[in-house]
Image (cartoon, rainbow, N blue to C red):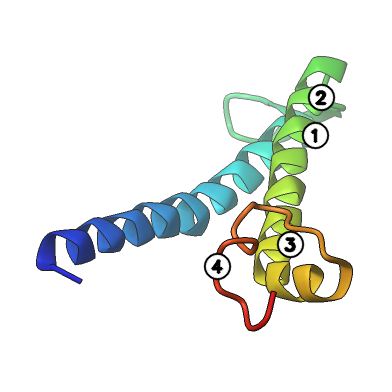
Amino acid sequence: MNLLAMLHNLLEVLIAGLVLGAGLPALFALGIRFAAPVDEVDENGTVISTHPASGLQRAIGYFFFSIIVLAIIVGILWITKAVIYEDLGIDIFGTQAGGGHGGH
């Protein structure tokens, strides 16, 4: 493997780490922010009343949560892709069929 290819692979891993390492917690924070009740405060900072989030705000929050759940499911499938291919013969991501997996 030459240096350029190694740097390219390192960049891909770095980008994936940033997206998954910082992106998913950021999406979670946004989901909480949109789905949480809204506080009404006075000029002193005292909470006067609390109103539930609107339907649209909750839907946006749940959308962010669904992205996180989808990322978790894809991550689990990625980690177990070889076992799924060995046991069930299903090549989920198209990476096992030509990968020189022992005897297949």
* Label 3 vs 2, first from the N-terminus: 2
**Residue 12 sits in which quadrant?**
bottom left
Mark 1–mark 2 CB contact (< 8 Å):
yes
41 horizontally vs 56: left or right: left
Numbered mark located on residue 62 in the image = 1
* Label 3 vs 4, first from the N-terminus: 3
* Mark 4, residue position: 99
x then y, percent, for residue 2: 14, 68
* Mark 3, residue position: 77
Which of label 2 and label 4 is nearer to you? 4
x then y, percent, for residue 11: 27, 56
* Mark 2, residue position: 59
Between residues 64 and 104, which one lies in front from this camera angle? 104
x then y, percent, for residue 47: 73, 34
* Label 3 vs 1, first from the N-terminus: 1
x then y, percent, for residue 23: 50, 47
